[in-house]
Amino acid sequence: QKEVEQNSGPLSVPEGAIASLNCTYSDRGSQSFFWYRQYSGKSPELIMFIYSNGDKEDGRFTAQLNKASQYVSLLIRDSQPSDSATYLCAVKRDNNRLAFGKGNQVVVIP
Amino acid sequence: DTEVTQTPKHLVMGMTNKKSLKCEQHMGHRAMYWYKQKAKKPPELMFVYSYEKLSINESVPSRFSPECPNSSLLNLHLHALQPEDSALYLCASSQREGVYGNTIYFGEGSWLTVV
């Protein structure tokens, strides 16, 4: 089992809809969880971080964490064409190592 | 805009060249990182410096040599690279090592092509 899994293929959503991205992780002791957005040819940009169970909202983005299920998700409300990017889920391991999922490509269709 | 600055943005080097990638941050962060990212893959950790000391080397070949001259600067010295080392090299920093409250921020990256 991979340490961080993002299994969904490319996600196409109409403009204005909700994009939902999921991520599971294998290390039950993981404490910190991050979502990065990466545009093609650019570096990863932090979108959200979450440490506690439940929801965390920041503008159009909501991160959800369920440690019992070892599951973290990202919702993008009112999706815009500028949200088209690859979204990387990352989980903090010991000594500050970040384990990344392979990423999910999101395409927002105008 | 990222507060982690990397130079050069693009570098083309031959397999016998010696070159360096540079990274600078002025956020007072005490942990700095080098990651390597190939196309359509997630970033892979190479090195971690904590309080200017190398704390993690992820079994990186010796043709990559990191250096942390002070708390704001991080270099990656390159020598005798192979074409398969062509990738985006990302510098990152965080307040310190540890689990909580240490969000890692990435620079814009240096695109390296080895010919």
Image: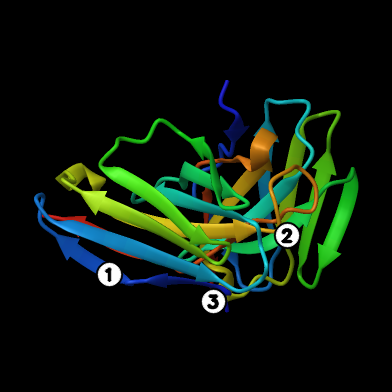
Same chain for labels 3 and 2? Say yes or no.
Answer: yes
The dot on residue B33 is none
| SS for dot 3 | loop
Residue A100 lies, in percent from the top left, at: 56, 42
Q: Residue A36, percent across and down?
A: 61, 57
Q: CA distance from mark 2 to mark 1?
A: 29 Å
Q: Residue at x 55, y 67 (%)?
A: B72
Q: Residue furthest front?
A: B69
Q: Nearer the viewer, residue B115 or A23?
A: B115
Q: Residues within 10 Å of mark 3 (few under 14, many from 20)?
A: few
Chain on which label 1 sits: B
Residue that extends furthest to the bottom in the rendered view of this protein: B1
- At label 3, the amino acid type is Pro
Please name which of the two marks, 1 or 3, marks the residue nearer to the observer: 1
Q: Residues within 10 Å of mark 1 (few under 14, many from 20)?
A: few
Label 2 resides on the chain identified as A
Q: Quadrant of the C terminus of chain A?
A: bottom right
The image shows residue A72 at horizontal and vertical percentages of: 75, 42
SS for dot 1: strand
Q: Report which residue position mark 1 lands on.
A: B10
- Residue extending farthest to the top is A1
> Do marks 2 and 1 share a chain?
no
Q: Nearer the viewer, residue A13 or A101?
A: A101
Task: Point out residue A35 in the picture as x, y percentages from the top left corner.
Answer: 66, 54
Location of mark 2 (residue): A48
Discs 3, 2 touching: Cβ within 8 Å: no
**Does the rendering let one see residue B10?**
yes
Given the image, on which type of amino acid does mark 2 rest? Met
Specify the amino acid type for callout 1.
His
Q: Is residue B39 left or right of residue A100?
A: left
